Amino acid sequence: MKKITRNLVAAFAVTFLFVGLAQAQILTDYVQSTGVEATDTVTVNSTTRLYVMPDPVYSPSYVASTNANLGTNQRWEWYPSTDGSGTAIKAAANENWIEYTWGSSPTTYPVSVIESNSAVSCPGSASTINVEIIAEPTVAYTVADGSGIFGSSGSPFSFCEGAARLGTDAVQATFTHGMTGSPSLQVEYTLAVDTSHNGGGSWTNIAAMTQSYDGAAGTQQAVTGTTHNLTAPAGGFVPVNDGVDYPTRFTYTLTGVNDRITRKCDYLTNSAAAPAAWSWYDTTDLETIVIVVNPTPVTGPIYHISNMWAN
């Protein structure tokens, strides 16, 4: 009876150890592929890692939070299939992870892994996950002009100061992405302000009035939907006064976008989630919208030949 009791206690101990490891997170941020997390979603061309929980019998001292103390003889081999078949994409090694650069086209890519022991040659069954590779996010201006929006189809705009639209309309960005659910987008852009002292023949930038929502500086804007109204200039769309009002040009330039999946795919280089260290996408088009506000002309006095000219 005592022998049976000891065996049962040992069995329960192993069971509880296994359950505890299965529910743990590896390196704090890696979660088990089950339920809503059953599929790993990544961005095209990104590089990420996958980890697998080691068998506690062969790695009894394993520490999930630091991914430490793997069993010396344990080996993991990774395959591009659902059952451990095919040519391995990572040969058997004493590493319970794979670092992989995903393809350039959206698709679903199966990955499986088999644990074995080099001393006893007992390979396990395959654990499998589907990796959903999605397109990069994009950003552009809303095209249709009107209904409260300065659409790109109307750019460049030219208004007289005080025009009604200058007080009501906004420049709007529109986004695309490849995921299901909230994309949690971020956008970066700049707003430059220039004036002309020769009636629009040439323009001089006013650096102090530039507004930058720049990802490199960590001042990008969060987006809650698939469109986002960009911030109006400080003080509104009004002519700059330099003694008198001068024609003023406001230029919006889109410089990039990211989403929650692209940011997730930055984990290997930005595990601290520093706002200024995210990768940015759609950064080469640099699409602009230009709004020129012209001051109302001041009609001067009338001149005539003096009545005393021929006196």
Image: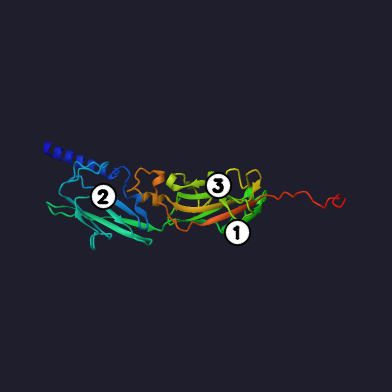
252 vs 234: above or below: below
Q: Is residue 241 left or right of residue 12?
A: right
Nearer to us in this view, 10 or 80: 80
Residue that numbered label 3 is attached to: 206
Image depth: mark 3 or mark 1 in front: 3
Label 2 environment density (alpha carbons within 10 Å; few <14, some 14–19, many ≥20): many
Q: Where residue 54 sits in the image (x, y, percent)?
A: 22, 47
**What label does residue 52 carry, if any?**
2
Q: Nearer the viewer, mark 1 or mark 2?
A: 1
Q: Position of residue 99 (x, y in %)?
A: 28, 53
Q: Amino acid at mark 2?
A: Val
Q: Is residue 146 visible?
A: no
- Quickly name the residue at label 1: 154
Asked whether the beta carbons under mark 1 and mark 2 sit within 8 Å of each other, the answer is: no
Amino acid carrying mark 3 in the image: Ile
Q: What kind of element bears circle 1?
A: helix
Residue 147, given in percent of the width and then of the height, sits at 62, 54
Q: Is residue 251 left or right of residue 111?
A: right
User: Measuring 46% from the left and 44% from the top, which residue is drawn there?
Assistant: 219
- Using the rendered view, name the quadrant where residue 27 is placed: top left
User: Is tag 3's residue or tag 1's residue first in the polypeptide sequence?
Assistant: 1
Q: Earlier in the sequence, mark 1 or mark 2?
A: 2
Give the distance between the C-alpha atoms of the residues marked 3 and 1, in whole angstroms: 24 Å
Q: Quadrant of the N terminus?
A: top left
